[in-house]
Amino acid sequence: MARRCELTGKGVQSGNNVSHAKNRTRRRFLPNLVKVTLLSEILSTGVKMRISAHALRSVEHRGGLDAFLVKAKDADLSTNALQIKRKIEKAQAAA
């Protein structure tokens, strides 16, 4: 399982540990991923996803999963999130 947020695409970054003597060794900065079940109001179902804590705050700020996915770019979303986005768009068009 890749260490990548399904909604924002945030992934692993690399950098240096820097000691007091300015010695540098390589390290990895991992995203803060959490497993959550987000509720879709349009689909009236829960969707299990592995997203970053930052993305969770963004979803709540934009007014829920449906509003977030409608505004999100397709390039940032995972295949699972893209399928959910298509279902939401189809349900909105039918309603």
Image: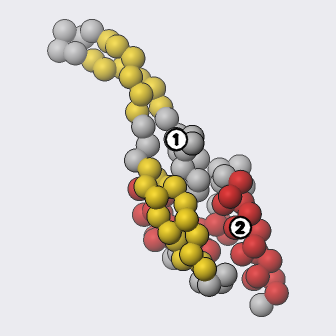
Disc with the residue nearer the chain's start (2 vs 1): 1
Per the image, the residue denoted by label 2 is: 85
Please report the residue visible at 22 percent of the width from the left and 15 percent of the height from the top. 19
Q: Is residue 73 left or right of residue 17?
A: right
Residue 78 percent coordinates (x, y): 66, 52
Residue 73 in sight from this viewpoint: no
User: Dot 2: what SS?
Assistant: helix
Please report the residue visible at 46 percent of the width from the left and 71 percent of the height from the top. 60
Q: Is residue 29 left or right of residue 11?
A: left
Q: Amino acid at mark 2?
A: Lys
Against 36, residue 90 (above or below) is below
Please report the residue visible at 55 percent of the width from the left and 60 percent of the height from the top. 49
Q: CA distance from mark 2 to mark 1?
A: 21 Å
Which numbered marker is on residue 3?
A: 1
Residue 71 percent coordinates (x, y): 65, 66
Q: Quadrant of the N terminus?
A: top right
Indicate the quadrant where residue 69 lies. bottom right
